[in-house]
Image (tube, rainbow, N blue to C red):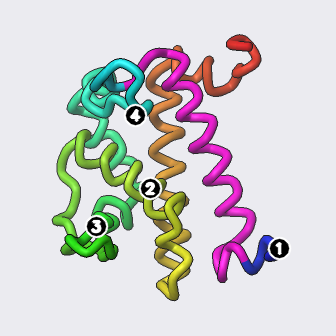
Amino acid sequence: MLTTEELLNGLSPDVTLRFFATFARMEFALKQLRLLRFTAEGDVAQMDQPRLVARLGAGFFQTVQAAHVAETLIGVPPKRFLVSRDGGVEFGPQPAPIATTADLIGATWRVRNNLFHGNKLFPADRERDERLMTDAMVVLDMILQLLPDVSEAFRQPQRYF
């Protein structure tokens, strides 16, 4: 079995494990509040990004931007991870800087997806990776500040057991 340091391959254990735990708790809260997307009965649970964006409102992006936080996430968002015809994987082109709440939420979850699905384990810019994780956690914290019900489910998960 690999050690934590070997598994994280150069990423800070403190930042990375905090990121994992924060996202796990946020997704739990969204699930408990039924902010999941319905595609078909019994289909995989996925966050309903449009409903979350609608609850946050168009001004959420401007609030984040005005706070001068998440600047790496906004200015140079993470790339999408794409599957090629042969089943291989590659990153898509660099997305344009973020300009909307929907794009901000999408980029925040893309940081999660890229890390959770192993793409931060390849040799990369660890400083940027950690800035993106930190920026994403700031966005999640701002969501919690704006949406009391999400905050309550996030902070008091035992209510749902």
Q: CA distance from mark 3 to mark 4?
A: 19 Å
Label number found at residue 113:
2
Q: Position of residue 152 (x, y in %)?
A: 62, 18
Residue 56: percent from left, percent from top: 32, 27
* Magenta region, main secondary structure: helix
Q: Closest to the observer: 127 or 11?
A: 11
Question: Horizontal and vertical percent for residue 64?
Answer: 36, 45
Where disc 2 sits, the SS reads helix
Q: CA distance from mark 4 to mark 2?
A: 12 Å
- Amino acid type of disc 1? Met
Report how far apart the C-alphas of labels 3 and 2 lie in the structure. Answer: 14 Å
Task: Nearest to the eye among marks 1 and 2: give it.
Answer: 1
Q: Residues within 10 Å of mark 3 (few under 14, many from 20)?
A: few
Q: Marks 3 and 4: which is nearer the front?
A: 3
Closest to the observer: 148 or 32? 32
Give the residue type at disc 3: Val
The CA span between labels 1 and 2 is 24 Å
Q: Which mark is residue 83?
A: 3
Residue 38 is left or right of residue 32, and the answer is left
